[in-house]
């Protein structure tokens, strides 16, 4: 079974630039999560989708971060404009509807200079 | 105060040693996860617990719901066990049901 795919794996940008990350969840997984993991900390939930609807985006900095899952399958997370403190690993995870086990992708490591 | 606290933050062990990592939480949960994260790698789910004890190979996870505490044990540790071990709890209330709150992780290094 193919796992959660993410791209790119690494990205280096300058502050105030824009960046987008892509996630393709495991086939059949209705729930998709985006997490931000700053070095030395545990992941923090940014947004949770159920199919193409947003369930929880209470911790998403909406002035600069946006995410969509238009067809209820793959998802993109965008940062515009990026700040130095956005340097982190961005993890995507997915799960079957109603199940608690989440499957994580390899993450995208972002460095903002 | 963080809702999920892990100890120790860093742990260095000699190959073969018995290792224990602890996790305490302060919120109502429906389940607790132990996850493993290798440098540069993704996160792998080791266990999901809602009560009692689970064992998989050299790994054992226990949870005490009344005390809001869980432990992850590694028997006969090996250098390939070196990784960050993360405790995450699944909330069981309100609109946040199903969401995970993560501890900061325990960085384990096993020396040969």
Image (cartoon, coloured by chain):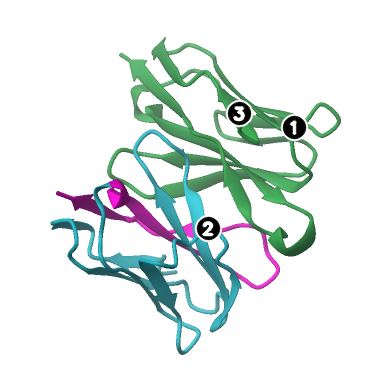
Chain colours: A cyan, B green
Q: In the picture shown, does residue B102 fall above or below A12? A: above
A31, B20: nearer the viewer: A31
Residue designated by label 1: B63
Q: In the picture shown, does residue A86 fall above or below A33? A: above
Under circle 2, the secondary element is loop
Under circle 3, the secondary element is strand
Task: Give the magenta-colored segment's residue range.
Answer: A85-113
Q: Earlier in the sequence, mark 3 or mark 1?
A: 3
Check if mark 3 and mark 1 are on a common chain: yes
Residue designated by label 3: B5
The quarter of the displayed image where residue A20 is located: bottom left
Hey, which residue is sitting farthest right in the picture? B66
Residue visible at 86% across and 30% down in the picture: B66
Under circle 1, the secondary element is strand
Q: Quick check: is A92 in the magenta stretch?
A: yes
Q: Does residue B65 appear left or right of residue A88 in this picture? A: right
Residue visible at 44% across and 13% down in the picture: B16
| Label disc, if present, on residue B46 of the rendered structure | none
Residue designated by label 2: A59
């Amino acid at each position: 079974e193919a796992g959660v795919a993410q791209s790119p794996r690494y990205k280096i940008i300058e502050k105030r630039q824009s960046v987008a990350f892509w996630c393709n969840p495991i086939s059949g997984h209705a729930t998709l999560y985006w997490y931000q993991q700053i070095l030395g900390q545990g992941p923090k939930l940014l947004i949770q989708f159920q199919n193409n609807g947003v369930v929880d985006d209470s911790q998403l900095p909406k002035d600069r971060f946006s995410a969509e899952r238009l067809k209820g399958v793959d998802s993109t997370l965008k940062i515009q404009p990026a700040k130095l403190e956005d340097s982190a690993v961005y993890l995507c995870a997915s799960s079957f509807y109603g199940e608690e086990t989440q499957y994580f992708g390899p993450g995208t490591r972002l460095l903002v200079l | 105060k963080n809702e999920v606290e892990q100890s120790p933050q860093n742990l260095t062990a000699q190959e073969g040693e018995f290792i224990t990592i602890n996790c305490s939480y302060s919120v109502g949960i429906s389940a607790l996860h132990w996850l493993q994260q290798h440098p540069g790698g993704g996160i792998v789910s080791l266990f999901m617990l809602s009560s009692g004890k689970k064992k998989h190979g050299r790994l054992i996870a226990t949870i005490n719901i009344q005390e809001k505490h869980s432990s992850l044990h590694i028997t006969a540790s090996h250098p390939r066990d070196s990784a960050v071990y993360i405790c995450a709890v699944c909330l069981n209330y309100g609109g946040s049901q199903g969401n995970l709150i993560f501890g900061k992780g325990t960085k384990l290094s096993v020396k040969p």
